[in-house]
Image (cartoon, rainbow, N blue to C red):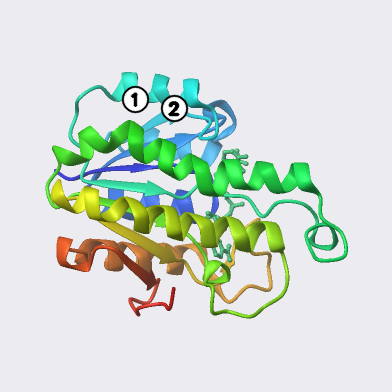
Amino acid sequence: MESVLITGANKGIGLELVRGFAASGRHVIACCRAPGDAEDLQALASADSKVEVHEVHVSDGDSVATLAKQIGDRPIDILINNAGMAGPDFQHQGLADMDYDGWAEVFAVNTMAPLRVLQAFRANLAQGTNPRAVTVTSQMGAIGLDMPVMFAYCSSKGAVNKVMRLAAPELKKEGITVALVHPGFVKTDMGGPSAHITAEESAAGLISVIDALTIDDSPCFKTWEGNDHVW
Ligand SMILES: NC(=O)c1ccc[n+]([C@@H]2O[C@H](COP(=O)([O-])OP(=O)(O)OC[C@H]3O[C@@H](n4cnc5c(N)ncnc54)[C@H](OP(=O)(O)O)[C@@H]3O)[C@@H](O)[C@H]2O)c1
């Protein structure tokens, strides 16, 4: 049975990824900051023994190390860095006004944490079958997309794309595929109610994309619909 580790698994796209992967027969290591408050995720885990819930604070090295210790040397086939944040209020992350502390926090969560989590589970992935290291990025991180808003968020996603591209050649030697995925404009707490698609639709598309990945794709930047995205 394939094993999938997902961060930010308590709500939004992460929760629907847990639901979708478990429904299709995978074992899911579902990680979030506050398992005690994650009612929907706990309900899923109670109803399906293939879902196990763990606490992790992805921007805290000790917390990630504790999670890695709990997982031990179990193989992981798919790692999904999904946890992410939009950062300071819209008007405080632009040319006229930047909340620098807020920008640093966004970088810690959206850019640095995915590498930290990847490092922590690299050996587990190396033991997996067709192992894939997937990061949920955003089209807003594409260098070529000229949408001059949300400087902190966009730069954090552009930077994580670059970090994962940098990691890809070395990981390819270990058989690990690196993929960045854009989930669409999704109706979650982050995307808001006027976004274009539901978290269920996004997760279903992402699962199809992730299932089709092979080492020959690495590194790639794909949309939830399976199209190549410009870097
Ligand atoms: N929604 C969209 O339209 C859209 C578009 C492009 C990309 N994305 C990306 O998709 C991913 C999932 O987002 P979503 O739309 O599902 O948003 P969401 O419903 O707001 O969920 C965000 C997840 O990230 C976690 N998270 C937030 N801040 C964190 C922090 N400081 N430390 C650790 N975990 C943190 C949240 O945990 P808590 O509940 O504990 O805060 C939650 O599990 C993100 O990487 C986001 O950038 C979303």
What count of labels does the image hold? 2
In this view, 132 is above or below 53:
below
Q: Is residue 227 left or right of residue 144?
A: left
- Classed neighbour count for the residue bearing mark 2: other residues with Cα under 10 Å, few (<14), some (14–19), many (≥20): many
Q: Amino acid at mark 1?
A: Ala
Residue 16 sits in quarter? bottom left
Residue 54, percent from left and from top: 42, 28
Residue name at image x 63 percent, y 80 percent? 146
In this view, 212 is above or below 227:
above
Q: Is residue 144 left or right of residue 230?
A: right
Quadrant holding the C terminus: bottom left
Between residues 209 and 94, which one lies in front from this camera angle?
A: 94
Q: Is residue 56 left or right of residue 28?
A: right
Residue name at image x 32 percent, y 19 percent? 69
Residue on which disc 2 sits: 64
Secondary element type, mark 2: helix
Residue name at image x 28 percent, y 67 percent? 208
Between residues 168 and 37, which one lies in front from this camera angle?
A: 168
Residue on which disc 1 sits: 68
Secondary element type, mark 1: helix
Q: Amino acid at mark 2?
A: Val
Residue 94 sits in quarter? bottom right
